């Protein structure tokens, strides 16, 4: 299998992921996978599954789509969009992810890059107002 084929398999898995399919992570991800996003920095497939389980518990009607990707050797960078209902309100997050495949063509590193301040924290009443204030002050608008 090529890295392109391994990524296609992982992409299809992620885009079709449901809480009932979380047990399939070990088919695509190394047991010692490194996972990082703005809220987590962990190692291990079971811990990664736990993060996704919490996400499904909090976000209803979740949809995930990979918009674009680029491959260089064993590294794949992809742009994505996640949407759903969080605390009764529509919510969309956009970001980039870097994944690395090991020799068995399983993901051994999954690092997400997205702006938690503007896409999560600013949506909360008190802290959101404060963050928007600082953003305007810093940008000069």
Image (cartoon, grey):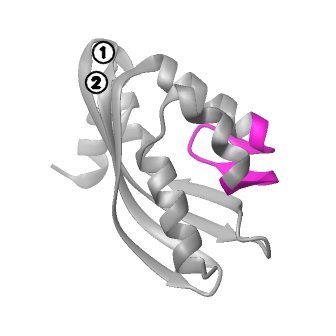
Q: Is residue 87 left or right of residue 49?
A: left
Q: Residue furthest left?
A: 141
Q: Which residue is mark 1?
A: 125
SS category of the residue bearing label 2: helix
The foreground one among 111 and 25 is 25
Instruction: Say which residue appears at 50% left-offset and 17% top-offset.
Output: 57
Q: Residue furthest bottom?
A: 73
The foreground one among 87 and 31 is 31
* Residue 50, horizontal then vertical, whole percent: 68, 29
Q: Foreground mark, 2 or 1?
A: 1
* Residue 121, horizontal then vertical, whole percent: 40, 29
| Residue 74 vertical placement versus 20 (above, below) | below
Q: Which residue is mark 2?
A: 129
Name the image quarter holding the N terminus. Answer: bottom right
**What is the distance, in whole Å, between disc 2 and disc 1 at their CAs?**
6 Å
Chain part drawn in magenta: 28-46
Q: Does residue 110 show up magenta in the picture?
A: no
| Residue 27 vertical placement versus 84 (above, below) | below
Q: Does residue 34 show up magenta in the picture?
A: yes
Toward which corner of the image does residue 125 lie, by quadrant? top left
* Residue 68, horizontal then vertical, whole percent: 34, 69
Instruction: Say which residue appears at 41% left-offset and 48% top-offset.
Output: 15
């Amino acid at each position: 299998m090529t890295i392109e084929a391994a990524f296609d398999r992982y992409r299809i898995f992620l885009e079709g992921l449901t809480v009932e399919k979380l047990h399939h992570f070990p088919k695509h991800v190394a047991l010692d996978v490194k996972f990082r996003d703005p809220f987590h920095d962990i190692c291990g497939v079971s811990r990664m599954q736990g993060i996704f389980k919490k996400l499904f518990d909090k976000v209803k009607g979740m949809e995930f789509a990979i918009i674009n990707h680029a491959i260089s050797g064993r590294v794949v960078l992809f742009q994505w969009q996640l949407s759903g209902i969080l605390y009764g309100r529509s919510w969309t997050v956009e970001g980039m992810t870097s994944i690395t495949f090991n020799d068995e063509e399983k993901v051994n590193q999954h690092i997400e890059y997205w702006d938690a301040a503007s896409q999560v924290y600013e949506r909360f009443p008190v802290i959101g107002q404060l963050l928007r204030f600082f953003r305007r002050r810093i940008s000069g608008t």
